[in-house]
Image (cartoon, rainbow, N blue to C red):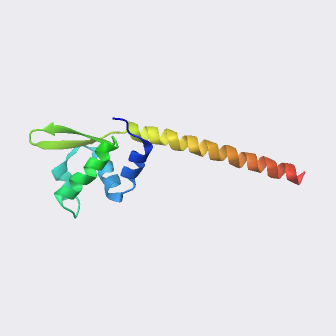
Amino acid sequence: MVVGADDVFHALADATRRDILTRVIRSGQSVSELARAYPMSFAAVQKHVAVLERAALVSKTRRGREQIVHGEVEPLRRMTRLLDGYEALWRQRAAGIEQILEEDEQ
């Protein structure tokens, strides 16, 4: 499955999903453990985890009857590189504007 930036940004657009991701990056947790941390139903937490899983931000493994959710950092690294590229582009444009303004002053 190919995961695009849109999937990652969509997944990270929700505060609950960002919090879930933070928790499972620190330490893998079962969906049941995660559900106890939020004032919502187990099914709602499962849906949030599913969105994170579609974006490849988390993976699940089985431990007996439980599914343990683990954070995946590689998609975050890819997004960091993407955003760094945009930052470099904007810095380059700002420098170009600055150069034009300096030339106009002379």
Image coordinates of residue 50 in percent, x first then y, are 26, 48
Is residue 92 placed above or below 101 in the rendered structure?
above
Quarter of the image with the N terminus is top left
Q: Where is residue 79? Give x, y as percent.
A: 46, 42
Residue 45 visible within the image: yes
Q: Can you say whether 36 is above or below 6 in the image?
A: below
In the shown orientation, is residue 44 left or right of residue 25?
left
Q: Residue furthest right?
A: 106
Looking at the image, residue 67 sits to the left or right of residue 91; the answer is left
Residue extending farthest bottom: 39
Camera sees residue 23: no
Q: Nearer the viewer, residue 8 or 91?
A: 8
Q: Which one is in front, 85 or 5?
A: 5
- Give the tally of numbered discs: 0
Report the residue at 79% width, 47% height from top. 99
Residue 56 coordinates in the image, percent (x, y)? 33, 40
Eyeballing the image, is 39 above or below 60?
A: below
Identify the residue at image location x=65%, y=46%: 91
Give how far across and how far down residue 30 sits, in percent.
18, 47
Report whether 68 appears left or right of 98: left
